[in-house]
Image: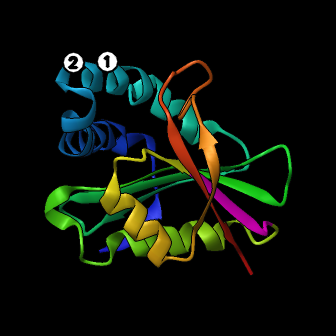
């Protein structure tokens, strides 16, 4: 696997990857219908294309030339020292093989001016919480609107100091 910047030709594959990982992770938490609703909004081709064009951001895929097994997206905030990791997902069959760590490392390297990487994670997503803690993140708070204003989805907020 190697990590590279995503392109428009990757978007349908990334959309399918996000749907698969979301169903594997969140069906038991939110139910299939709610996961379908969220993925159709947040992971539509148009939404993913907008991320490609977003300034001060990085949209990455983990690719071996045959399959895209992981994706990560992060963007700078209004505070140039703080970057938000908005997505980091690896297909279930490829988890625990270092792909998430590769994506995370590349995200960290993509924002040399930043000193903090922040993310939101569903409190019931124990594997993700273990991953982030193992990679130096600490819990700093909570939100009631994970992913988007008004989402009504509770989440824990984690940060990692960079540099």
- Residue stretch in magenta: 114-119
* Residue marked by disc 1: 37
Q: Is residue 69 above or below residue 24?
A: below
Left or right: residue 30 versus residue 109 is left
Q: Position of residue 103 (x, y in %)?
A: 45, 68
Graded by Cα atoms within 10 Å as few (under 14), some (14 to 19) or many (20 or more), the crowding at tag 2 reads few
Q: Are marks 2 and 1 in contact (CB under 8 Å)?
A: yes
Residue 33's label in the rendered image is 2
Residue 81's label in the rendered image is none
Residue 149 visible to the viewer: yes
- Residue drawn at the location 38% of the way across and 25% of the way down: 44
Q: Is residue 77 above or below residue 140?
A: above
Rounded to the nearest angstrom, the CA distance separating label 2 from label 1 is: 6 Å
Residue 3 visible to the viewer: no
- Residue drawn at the location 57% of the way across and 65% of the way down: 107
- Residue drawn at the location 18% of the way across and 57% of the way down: 92
- Residue drawn at the location 62% of the way across and 23% of the way down: 149
């Amino acid at each position: 696997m190697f990590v590279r910047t995503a392109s428009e030709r990757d978007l349908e594959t990334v959309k399918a990857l996000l749907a698969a990982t979301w169903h594997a992770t969140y069906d038991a938490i939110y139910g299939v219908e709610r996961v379908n609703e969220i993925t159709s909004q947040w992971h539509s081709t148009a939404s993913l294309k907008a991320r490609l064009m977003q300034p001060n951001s990085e949209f990455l895929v983990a690719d071996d030339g045959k399959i895209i097994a992981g994706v990560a997206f992060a963007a700078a905030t209004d505070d140039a020292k703080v970057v938000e990791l908005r997505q980091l997902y690896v297909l279930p069959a490829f988890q625990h093989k270092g792909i998430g760590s590769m994506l995370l490392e590349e995200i960290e390297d993509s924002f040399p001016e930043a000193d903090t990487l922040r993310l939101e994670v569903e409190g019931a997503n124990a594997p993700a919480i273990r991953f982030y803690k193992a990679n130096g993140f600490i819990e700093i708070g909570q939100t009631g609107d994970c992913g988007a204003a008004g989402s009504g989805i509770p989440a824990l907020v984690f940060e990692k100091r960079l540099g």
